[in-house]
Structures are given as C-alpha cells and as structure tokens.
Amino acid sequence: MTMLEKTTRINYLFDFYQALLTPKQREYMSLYYLDDLSLGEIADEYEVSRQAVYDNIKRTEAMLEEYEDKLQLFQKFLERGTIIEQMERCLSVKELNNTKLGKYLVLLKELD
C-alpha cells in the first residue's frame, strides 16, 4: 500500500469512526491527516514531544482499523459504490434488464 493509499484509507476511516475517538485523538488526526501538519508542528502547538504525537497517531490509526474490522462501514461503503456504478452502467446503455437490476438491489439490501 502506497503512502497515498494509506492516507486516503485513514481519512475515510476517520470520517466513519471519528465520533468514537477522544477529542485529543480527533484533533491530532485532523491536524495530521486533514490539515497536513507535521508531527513537530502538532507537538509545538500542544507543548508535547514529537514522540507523544507520533504514538498517539499510531495508536489511533490502529483503533480505526480495529473499528473497521468489527463494523465494516468503509468496506460496505466501497461495495455499495461498486453496486451503484453497475446499476448506473445498466441504465446508461439502456440495458433495462430487470433481472440484473433486481440482483443489484438485493446486493445493496444485503449490505445493511
């Protein structure tokens, strides 16, 4: 996984699970991933060591991955997007195949 892929994944996980984090975890993750501040800049702002910020971010990333393992919100989001694209493709080529569209609707319902 490239750094860009990791950052994108963490941003999505943060969007889905940020309400489960402490205010400090949310703030560090937001500053690091959304505002693109360095560890040193965050450490200066909170008057803590760079290592403390790093440890907090790494622990929070692990927590986000654990939440995803259990709840699968991001995975279902991706699957839902794929199914919707397939449905749109059927409609765009005027392939009004009710069997295919019905299959996609069943798949969407099964995600919930």
Image (cartoon, helix red, strand yellow):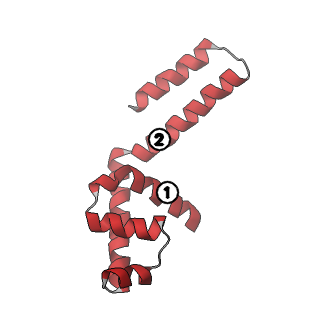
Indicate the quadrant containing the C terminus: top left, top right, bottom left or bottom right: top left
Q: In terms of depth relative to the viewer, which is nearer, 33 or 82?
A: 33
| Residue indicated by mark 2 | 77
Q: Residue 71's spot in the image, x, y percent?
A: 34, 45
Q: Is 111 or 93 nearer to us in this picture?
A: 93
**Residue 72 visible in the picture:** yes
Evaluate whether residue 2 shows in this view: no
The residue type indicated by label 1 comes to Arg
Which one is nearer the viewer's eye here, 45 or 86? Answer: 45
Q: Which residue is mark 1?
A: 9
Front in this rendered view, residue 36 or 65? 36
Secondary element at tag 2: helix
Quarter of the rendering containing residue 23: bottom left
Give the CA separation, mark 1 to mark 2: 12 Å
Quarter of image, res 94:
top right
Question: At which x and y percent is residue 92?
Answer: 71, 24
Name the residue located 31 percent from the left edge and 66 percent from the top edge: 25
